[in-house]
Protein backbone atom coordinates (compact mmCIF):
# COMPACT_ATOMS: atom_id res chain seq x y z
CA UNK A 1 0.00 0.00 0.00
CA UNK A 2 2.84 2.38 0.87
CA UNK A 3 4.53 1.56 -2.43
CA UNK A 4 1.37 2.41 -4.39
CA UNK A 5 0.88 5.74 -2.63
CA UNK A 6 4.60 6.52 -2.85
CA UNK A 7 4.67 5.94 -6.60
CA UNK A 8 1.54 8.05 -7.04
CA UNK A 9 2.99 10.86 -4.95
CA UNK A 10 6.19 10.73 -7.01
CA UNK A 11 4.23 10.83 -10.27
CA UNK A 12 2.11 13.73 -8.99
CA UNK A 13 5.24 15.63 -7.94
CA UNK A 14 6.77 15.06 -11.38
CA UNK A 15 3.61 16.31 -13.08
CA UNK A 16 3.53 19.42 -10.91
CA UNK A 17 7.24 20.02 -11.43
CA UNK A 18 6.95 19.96 -15.22
CA UNK A 19 3.98 22.34 -15.12
CA UNK A 20 5.76 24.76 -12.77
CA UNK A 21 8.90 24.69 -14.93
CA UNK A 22 6.86 25.53 -18.03
CA UNK A 23 5.10 28.36 -16.21
CA UNK A 24 8.42 29.74 -14.96
CA UNK A 25 9.82 29.70 -18.51
CA UNK A 26 6.75 31.54 -19.80
CA UNK A 27 7.10 34.13 -17.03
CA UNK A 28 10.77 34.66 -17.96
CA UNK A 29 9.71 35.29 -21.57
CA UNK A 30 7.15 37.83 -20.38
CA UNK A 31 9.77 39.59 -18.24
CA UNK A 32 12.15 39.68 -21.20
CA UNK A 33 9.44 41.25 -23.36
CA UNK A 34 8.74 43.85 -20.67
CA UNK A 35 12.45 44.68 -20.41
CA UNK A 36 12.58 45.04 -24.18
CA UNK A 37 9.67 47.49 -24.06
CA UNK A 38 11.42 49.54 -21.37
CA UNK A 39 14.64 49.61 -23.39
CA UNK A 40 12.87 50.75 -26.57
CA UNK A 41 10.90 53.39 -24.66
CA UNK A 42 14.12 54.68 -23.14
CA UNK A 43 15.73 54.81 -26.57
CA UNK A 44 12.76 56.71 -28.01
CA UNK A 45 12.85 59.19 -25.12
CA UNK A 46 16.56 59.74 -25.70
CA UNK A 47 16.05 60.29 -29.43
CA UNK A 48 13.19 62.73 -28.81
CA UNK A 49 15.27 64.62 -26.27
CA UNK A 50 18.11 64.86 -28.78
CA UNK A 51 15.62 65.95 -31.46
CA UNK A 52 14.23 68.67 -29.18
CA UNK A 53 17.66 70.01 -28.29
CA UNK A 54 18.69 69.97 -31.96
CA UNK A 55 15.47 71.80 -32.89
CA UNK A 56 16.20 74.42 -30.21
CA UNK A 57 19.70 74.85 -31.60
CA UNK A 58 18.26 75.20 -35.12
CA UNK A 59 15.78 77.82 -33.89
CA UNK A 60 18.62 79.83 -32.31
CA UNK A 61 20.83 79.63 -35.40
CA UNK A 62 21.20 82.83 -37.44
CA UNK A 63 18.89 82.60 -40.46
CA UNK A 64 21.67 83.30 -42.97
CA UNK A 65 23.87 80.44 -41.64
CA UNK A 66 22.56 78.03 -44.27
CA UNK A 67 25.30 75.43 -43.81
CA UNK A 68 24.63 74.93 -40.09
CA UNK A 69 20.84 75.10 -40.59
CA UNK A 70 21.08 72.42 -43.31
CA UNK A 71 23.13 70.10 -41.10
CA UNK A 72 20.78 70.58 -38.16
CA UNK A 73 17.70 69.98 -40.35
CA UNK A 74 19.25 66.76 -41.69
CA UNK A 75 20.05 65.68 -38.14
CA UNK A 76 16.45 66.36 -37.07
CA UNK A 77 15.12 64.43 -40.08
CA UNK A 78 17.41 61.51 -39.21
CA UNK A 79 16.26 61.58 -35.60
CA UNK A 80 12.60 61.61 -36.71
CA UNK A 81 13.29 58.56 -38.90
CA UNK A 82 15.02 56.82 -36.00
CA UNK A 83 12.05 57.55 -33.73
CA UNK A 84 9.71 56.15 -36.37
CA UNK A 85 11.77 52.93 -36.55
CA UNK A 86 11.89 52.69 -32.77
CA UNK A 87 8.11 53.12 -32.62
CA UNK A 88 7.80 50.11 -34.94
CA UNK A 89 10.16 48.21 -32.63
CA UNK A 90 7.98 49.29 -29.71
CA UNK A 91 4.85 47.98 -31.44
CA UNK A 92 6.59 44.62 -32.00
CA UNK A 93 7.71 44.58 -28.37
CA UNK A 94 4.14 45.24 -27.18
CA UNK A 95 2.92 42.40 -29.41
CA UNK A 96 5.59 40.09 -28.00
CA UNK A 97 4.56 41.07 -24.47
CA UNK A 98 0.91 40.39 -25.26
CA UNK A 99 1.78 36.98 -26.73
CA UNK A 100 4.00 36.14 -23.76
CA UNK A 101 1.23 37.16 -21.35
CA UNK A 102 -1.21 34.84 -23.15
CA UNK A 103 1.29 32.00 -22.84
CA UNK A 104 1.71 32.71 -19.11
CA UNK A 105 -2.07 32.67 -18.62
CA UNK A 106 -2.34 29.36 -20.52
CA UNK A 107 0.50 27.88 -18.47
CA UNK A 108 -1.13 28.98 -15.22
CA UNK A 109 -4.41 27.37 -16.32
CA UNK A 110 -2.49 24.26 -17.35
CA UNK A 111 -0.74 24.24 -13.97
CA UNK A 112 -4.16 24.24 -12.27
CA UNK A 113 -5.32 21.35 -14.47
CA UNK A 114 -2.15 19.40 -13.75
CA UNK A 115 -2.55 20.05 -10.04
CA UNK A 116 -6.09 18.67 -10.16
CA UNK A 117 -4.93 15.65 -12.19
CA UNK A 118 -2.09 15.04 -9.73
CA UNK A 119 -4.53 15.23 -6.83
CA UNK A 120 -6.76 12.75 -8.64
CA UNK A 121 -3.84 10.36 -9.20
CA UNK A 122 -2.89 10.62 -5.53
CA UNK A 123 -6.50 10.14 -4.43
CA UNK A 124 -6.94 7.09 -6.66
CA UNK A 125 -3.72 5.60 -5.33
CA UNK A 126 -4.83 6.17 -1.75
CA UNK A 127 -8.18 4.53 -2.52
CA UNK A 128 -6.40 1.57 -4.11
CA UNK A 129 -4.08 1.31 -1.11
CA UNK A 130 -7.05 1.40 1.27
CA UNK A 131 -8.72 -1.35 -0.76
CA UNK A 132 -5.54 -3.45 -0.61
CA UNK A 133 -5.32 -3.00 3.15
CA UNK A 134 -9.01 -3.84 3.56
CA UNK A 135 -8.67 -6.95 1.39
CA UNK A 136 -5.60 -8.04 3.33
CA UNK A 137 -7.40 -7.50 6.64
CA UNK A 138 -10.41 -9.52 5.43
CA UNK A 139 -8.13 -12.28 4.21
CA UNK A 140 -6.27 -12.22 7.51
CA UNK A 141 -9.56 -12.33 9.45
CA UNK A 142 -10.73 -15.31 7.36
CA UNK A 143 -7.47 -17.18 7.94
CA UNK A 144 -7.68 -16.46 11.66
CA UNK A 145 -11.26 -17.79 11.85
CA UNK A 146 -10.24 -20.92 9.92
CA UNK A 147 -7.28 -21.46 12.24
CA UNK A 148 -9.53 -21.05 15.30
CA UNK A 149 -11.97 -23.63 13.86
CA UNK A 150 -9.17 -26.10 13.23
CA UNK A 151 -7.73 -25.47 16.68
CA UNK A 152 -11.15 -25.99 18.28
CA UNK A 153 -11.64 -29.20 16.27
CA UNK A 154 -8.19 -30.46 17.26
CA UNK A 155 -8.89 -29.59 20.90
CA UNK A 156 -12.23 -31.40 20.79
CA UNK A 157 -10.59 -34.44 19.18
CA UNK A 158 -7.87 -34.39 21.83
CA UNK A 159 -10.43 -34.07 24.61
CA UNK A 160 -12.46 -36.94 23.15
CA UNK A 161 -9.36 -39.07 22.89
CA UNK A 162 -8.39 -38.13 26.45
CA UNK A 163 -11.85 -39.16 27.69
CA UNK A 164 -11.58 -42.45 25.83
CA UNK A 165 -8.15 -43.09 27.29
CA UNK A 166 -9.37 -42.09 30.74
CA UNK A 167 -12.26 -44.56 30.48
CA UNK A 168 -9.88 -47.24 29.31
CA UNK A 169 -7.53 -46.47 32.19
CA UNK A 170 -10.40 -46.66 34.72
CA UNK A 171 -11.53 -49.94 33.20
CA UNK A 172 -8.04 -51.30 33.35
CA UNK A 173 -7.65 -50.14 36.93
CA UNK A 174 -10.86 -51.81 38.08
Image (cartoon, rainbow, N blue to C red):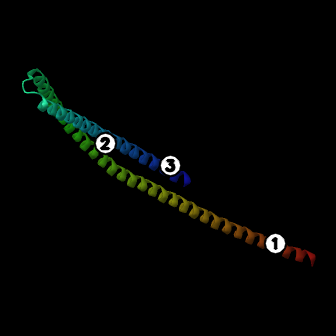
* Residue receiving disc 3: 7
Q: Residue at x 60, y 65 (%)?
A: 141
At 85% from the left and 74% from the top, the residue drawn is: 166
Q: Element at badge 2? A: helix
Mark 1 highlights which residue?
A: 162
Residue 30: which numbered mark, if any? 2
Q: Earlier in the sequence, mark 1 or mark 2?
A: 2
In terms of sequence position, does the residue under pointer 3 or pointer 1 come before the other? 3
Compare residues 5 and 19 and report the one nearer the observer.
19
Q: In the rendering, at what x and y percent does residue 42 appear?
A: 26, 37
Image coordinates of residue 45 in percent, x first then y, are 22, 37
Q: Mark 3, mark 2: which one is toward the viewer?
A: 2
Kindly state the secondary structure of the residue where label 1 is placed: helix
What is the x, y in percent for residue 120?
Answer: 41, 56
Is residue 64 found left or right of 156 in the rendered image? left
Quarter of the image that includes the N terminus? bottom right
Amino acid sequence: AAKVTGEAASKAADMRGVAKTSTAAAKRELEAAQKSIAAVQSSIASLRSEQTSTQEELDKTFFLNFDKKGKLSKTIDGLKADVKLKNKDLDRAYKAEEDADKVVQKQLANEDKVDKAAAKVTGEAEAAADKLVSTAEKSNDGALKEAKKKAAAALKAAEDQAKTLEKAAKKAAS
